Each structure stands twice: as C-alpha cells, then as structure tokens.
C-alpha cells in the first residue's frame, strides 16, 4: 500500500485496524510520516480504538456496519475537503 501511495494520484486512504500482516494503526503512522496531508479514515469493527492515541492521527474514525452510509459520508467529506476552493 505504501508503494502505491508513493506512486502518487491517491486522494484518500481507508484503513482497517485489524489487517492480515500488519496493524492498520502502524500503517497509519507510516502514512502520516510520509504523506501527512493525505486524508485517512480508520474503519474498524472495534469502537474501543476510537480513543486510542494512535487512532487520533486519522482524520475520521468509522465503526464498521453493514450500512455503509457513515463511511460514504466520511469519504465524501474527506475528498471534498481536498478540493481547492
């Protein structure tokens, strides 16, 4: 994922906290270190991570649900915030 970000033309990152080979919180930290202005949404089934010190580096935190309304709203907000006025 970080190699893809380095290639450019990425407007938003959506991360889960629990991933197969790495923690989304660790990836979030790497994204912030190299691509500070890139919006990041943490999307997790675990609402308890919302207050985690590492989680606050994300622009938005969404608790997973079968209803994707909140995630879609956060994606729209994040992308629109990057569009120059």
Image (cartoon, rainbow, N blue to C red):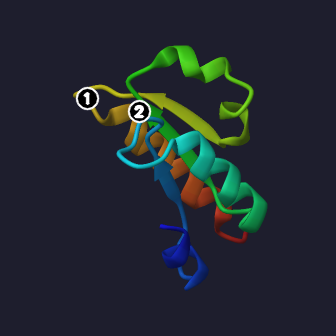
Q: Quadrant of the C terminus?
A: bottom right
Residue 70 is labelled as 2
Residue occupying the point 58% across, 59% down = 80
Residue 50: give x, y in percent of width and height. Answer: 60, 22
Mark 1 crowdedness (10 Å alpha carbons): few <14, some 14-19, many ≥20: few
42 and 26: which is toward the camera? 26
User: Label 2: few (<14), some or many (≥20) within 10 Å?
Assistant: some
Who is closer to the viewer here, 16 or 69?
Answer: 16
Q: Residue furthest left?
A: 66
Instruction: Note whether 70 is above or below 52 in the view shown.
Output: below
Q: Secondary structure at mark 1?
A: loop
| Left or right: residue 43 compared with residue 79 | left
Image coordinates of residue 62 in percent, x first then y, are 48, 31
The residue under the point 29% across, 25% down is 65
Closest to the observer: 32 or 69? 32
Residue on which the image places disc 1 = 67
Mark 1 and mark 2 residues within 8 Å of each other at the beta carbon: yes
Please count the marks in the image. Answer: 2
Residue 53 is left or right of residue 75, and the answer is right
**Residue ranking furthest to the front:** 21
Give percent across and percent down for residue 55: 65, 32
Quarter of the view holding residue 84: bottom right
The alpha-carbon separation of the residues under discs 1 and 2 comes to 8 Å
């Amino acid at each position: 994922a970080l190699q893809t970000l380095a290639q450019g033309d990425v407007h938003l990152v959506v991360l889960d906290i629990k991933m197969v080979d790495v923690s989304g919180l660790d990836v979030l930290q790497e994204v912030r270190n190299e691509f500070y202005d890139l919006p990041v949404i943490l999307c997790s089934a675990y609402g308890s991570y919302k207050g985690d010190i590492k989680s606050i580096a994300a622009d938005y935190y969404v608790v997973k649900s079968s209803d994707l309304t909140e995630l879609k709203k956060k994606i729209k907000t994040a992308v629109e915030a990057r569009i120059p006025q």
